[in-house]
Amino acid sequence: MAMLLAGICCVQAVEGETMSLGSRPLKVFILAGQSNMEGHAQARTFDHIGMDPVTAPMLEKMLGPDGEPRVLDDVLIASIRGEAVTEELFGPLNVGFGAERHGPKIGPEYTFGIYMHEALREPILLIKTAWGGKSLSFDFRPPRAGEWTPPPVDPELEDVQKPDPLPIPASLDIPVGFVPSREHFNPFTRLPGFFLYKGLRGADMGQHNGVYPIYICQDIRADVDDFPLRKGDVIVGINGEGLTENPRDHWRRVVWNEVMKSEVDWTLTVARWRDGNIKSFDIDFAAIAFPGGRADIPEFFRQQERERQEKAQDEGLYYRLMIKYIQHVLADIERVYPDYDPEQGYEIAGFVWFQGWNDLVDGNAYPRRGQPGGYDMYSWLLSQLIRDVRTDLAAPDMPFVIGVLGVDGHTEQHREFRQAMAAPASKPEFEGTVKAVETADFWDAQLEDLSRRANRINMKRTELSMKHGLQGAELTEALAAYEATVWTPEEKAIHAAGVSNAGFHYLGSAKILGQIGKAFAEAMVELIK
């Protein structure tokens, strides 16, 4: 439902100081991206910031003399909240400009505004355009990207060769009846492993005999007859190659981007370990996918083309909405910034981009994402985005900060994507005007560990109630006894104070997002000066 929200009234001045524009143009900063730019850190997690002596000084800047979150009179913010320019929230910067549900929340905007104000000592307007679940490859696709055919690698990046395929081993050094440990199962859905195809699920096993097998931990749907894979089997190779270090991406790349994109042959050859023996089998995926088998393949591709044409009109929709909202605000700044003087004008002083999750996990847009250079298209698209927003906002040298996705910290699993996100900052064309900030630097390993333990407790609660039938006081007592083996009271308190959302939202931690916003401001100040 579209709703025009009036400006938030100021509750507290910034240390009693109100600044005037003087003769300088109003500094305008654009904050754009997806859900992590929206911000899912509930204000209740502020207390956790003060528990760490490293971040405690940041909390002092975030709270006023009365211990409540600061409201900045001289930092105004306008934030779009839906898919129409009239769905917005604006007013002095305060908590509550994060994602809408289960608030009040903050994103990076809160500490970004605080530290930019401290560095510049002049009035600021933030314009925030962020929507959850949006990709750069489609939703934010910039105009000059057009219809893009991926090159083997980005010509401006170092050329990387595809590694040699691994041979399929003759045997596996695992015992008959092997079952992966609980850590291989999904703690959020409580389902085993990861999705392979139509109910078929697998789990990583680590390295065995030179390959990285997939254990089948859940059978394919019941109506598929004579399927050569069942629970307890192990896949060691597909189409003549041993599974590589990231076996789920290897599987998805072959099945979704080679087998199922073939208009002729929907056959996958699987090397399967069962009862100590390795054999290869051909699987006809058309027979599994369609009631009419291979006869239905032509209509499948015709339908795909119809859907592609229907969807094409939405390509770049959120890029266009982002620009439209920014222009909407700038066309009447006094509406959101009552003290603005048109004679003094404004300056678009910088742009912060914080996005990435939907591209990270999109195997269709990035079919080689499990390989070196698999995210080169993201680097190319982000470079085009920088050029296009500078053109569309008539700010040719606008400082641009890239918030490099840092969910899970500096893990090897996301290394290729982090490098691809940061790559545009190293291009000669953008020297001195684009800077990448590694948000993985601010990941909180302790909160991550405690969140995993909390998931174990939740799973135990389900087990006690569903499997053992415990309810009421019995359930509470049994769960308390189990909790005591999982964490200490102090650790439980840290988790309660610091976590308010899932890992892909930086655990909903104000400590993490607060440091990220501060780092964005520091990078922006470097570019400005």
Image: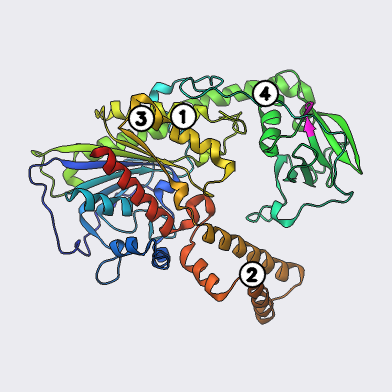
Amino acid residing under circle 2? Val
SS state under label 1: helix
User: First in sequence: mark 4 or mark 1?
Assistant: 4
Report the disc number at residue 386: 3
For the residues carrying marks 4 and 1, which lies nearer the camera in this image? Answer: 1
Amino acid residing under circle 4? Lys
Residue at 36% from the left image edge and 64% from the top image edge = 56
How far apart are the alpha carbons under marks 3 and 1? 11 Å
The residue indicated by pointer 2 is: 486
User: First in sequence: mark 3 or mark 1?
Assistant: 1
The residue indicated by pointer 1 is: 379
Residue 379 on image: x %, y %: 46, 29
How far apart are the alpha carbons under marks 4 and 1? 25 Å
| Residues marked 1 and 2 touching at CB (< 8 Å) | no
Residue 246's image quarter? top right
The residue indicated by pointer 4 is: 261
How far apart are the alpha carbons under marks 2 and 4? 47 Å
Residue 314 on image: x %, y %: 46, 30
Amino acid residing under circle 1? Ser
Structural crowding at the residue carrying mark 1, measured as other residues with C-alpha within 10 Å and reported as few (<14), some (14–19) or many (≥20): many
SS state under label 2: helix
How far apart are the alpha carbons under marks 3 and 2? 47 Å
Above or below — where is 445 with respect to 422? below
For the residues carrying marks 3 and 2, which lies nearer the camera in this image? Answer: 2
Structural crowding at the residue carrying mark 3, measured as other residues with C-alpha within 10 Å and reported as few (<14), some (14–19) or many (≥20): many
How far apart are the alpha carbons under marks 1 and 2? 42 Å
Amino acid residing under circle 3? Ile
User: First in sequence: mark 4 or mark 3?
Assistant: 4
Residue at 49% from the left image edge and 35% from the top image edge = 419
Start-end of magenta stretch = 237-241
Horizontal side of residue 85 vs 35, given as left or right = left
